[in-house]
Amino acid sequence: MKHVDVHILRALRAAGGLGVSGVELAQKLGVTRAAIWARIEELRRLGFEIEANPHLGYRLLSTPDVLLADDLLARLGRRRLIGSEIIVFKETGSTNDVADQLARAGAREGTIVLAEAQTRGRGRLGRRWFSPPGKGIWMSVILRPRLQPQQVTQLTVMCAVSVLEAIHAVTGLIPEIKWPNDILIRGRKLAGILTEMEAELDRIDYAIIGIGVNVNMDACDWPPALKAGATSLLLETGRWIDRPALATALIQQLDRYYHLLKSDQFSVIAREWQAHCTTTGKRVVIRTPTRIIAGVAEAIDQDGALLVRTHDGQIERVIGGDVTVERD
Ligand code: BTN
């Protein structure tokens, strides 16, 4: 049977304190009790604390701070587009590169690639993304949206709102969004989004959205040059955050908001984005590869582009670039 561990973990979670017997598990999954025992032993080896009680059966006492595909699949609901396939690496160069290769080879929409560590994590504008082992969520999602290439910013906006909601659900924090893809707290960067795509002139073939969330990083974890502008959920809450729970919440929110986007309700997402965005209403300077635009960021449009009123009163539509928000 495929994914036996997913079913075992799901049954253990559903049973909670009551426990579930080996016989029941074996019957449900159509395998022997010995096979269940062997899987329980393997789960224990992976760090799951599972009690075997003669009266109550197996009980899940605690779970490890490790990202495991079967554990994430067990935590997630059954019917989902995002997270239908999950692949986790202990270490990889960049999850965006792995996802790109998979997408090129035909991987299905919603496939997720996660890594405990990245050796060549990439940020926007050719920057490096610091991704130490076991401290963050370094994740990429393969999407095959029916959008035109110029609408790709919709995906970044959808993703920013999903990240925000997931962080709020798990930690209670309410971060701010800086257009189009920075998630900040107290002006420091908590998470970033790197959207890349393969497209024809008139349609997106596939898009990879890469999400990096600084979760349990301590101030001393960052190289000195990056320390000043960055923060983590651990630093902001003073608590160690359960990464598998956060990854699960993130996948659930992405599934929810991508569904909205696909059913032509980007305006709902855009409203939520506006409500948390600290860029609109501010004076901004945006550097694109070809020009510099200065003015007041007024809104985002139906494609996720930023509308900037420049000094001569014109509205400029900006789809990307390096944004500096001027202090009031
Ligand atoms: C940025 O703010 O510059 C975007 C950062 C995106 C980082 C993530 S981590 C997972 C994925 N893989 C990468 O190499 N980058 C993205």
Image (spheres, helix red, strand yellow):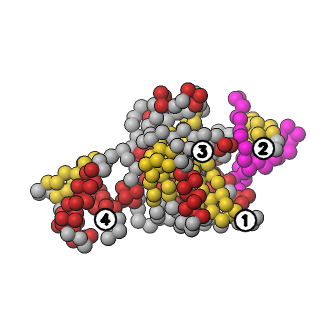
Residue 155 in the figure: left or right of residue 296: left
Q: Residues within 10 Å of mark 4 (few under 14, many from 20)?
A: some
Q: Viewer-nearest of labels 3 and 4?
A: 3
Residues under numbered marks 1 and 3 in contact, where contact means CB atoms less than 8 Å apart: no
Q: What is the magenta range?
A: 299-328
The disc at residue 4 is 4
Does the numbered disc 3 mark a residue whose Cβ is under 8 Å from ligand 1? yes
Of marks 3 and 4, which one's residue comes earlier in the chain? 4
Q: Viewer-nearest of labels 3 and 2?
A: 3
Amino acid at the residue labelled 3: Arg
Residues under numbered marks 1 and 2 in contact, where contact means CB atoms less than 8 Å apart: no
Amino acid at the residue labelled 2: Pro
Q: SS class of the residue under badge 4?
A: helix
Which residue is rendered at x = 48% and y = 52% of the image? 114
Q: Which residue is mark 2?
A: 289
Q: SS class of the residue under badge 3?
A: loop
Of marks 2 and 4, which one's residue comes earlier in the chain? 4
Amino acid at the residue labelled 4: Val
198 and 164: which is toward the camera: 198
Quarter of the image for residue 298 reads top right
Q: Which residue is mark 3?
A: 122
Of marks 1 and 3, which one's residue comes earlier in the chain? 3
Distance of label 1 from label 3 (alpha carbons) = 24 Å
Q: Which residue is mark 1?
A: 200
Q: Position of residue 290 (x, y in %)?
A: 82, 44
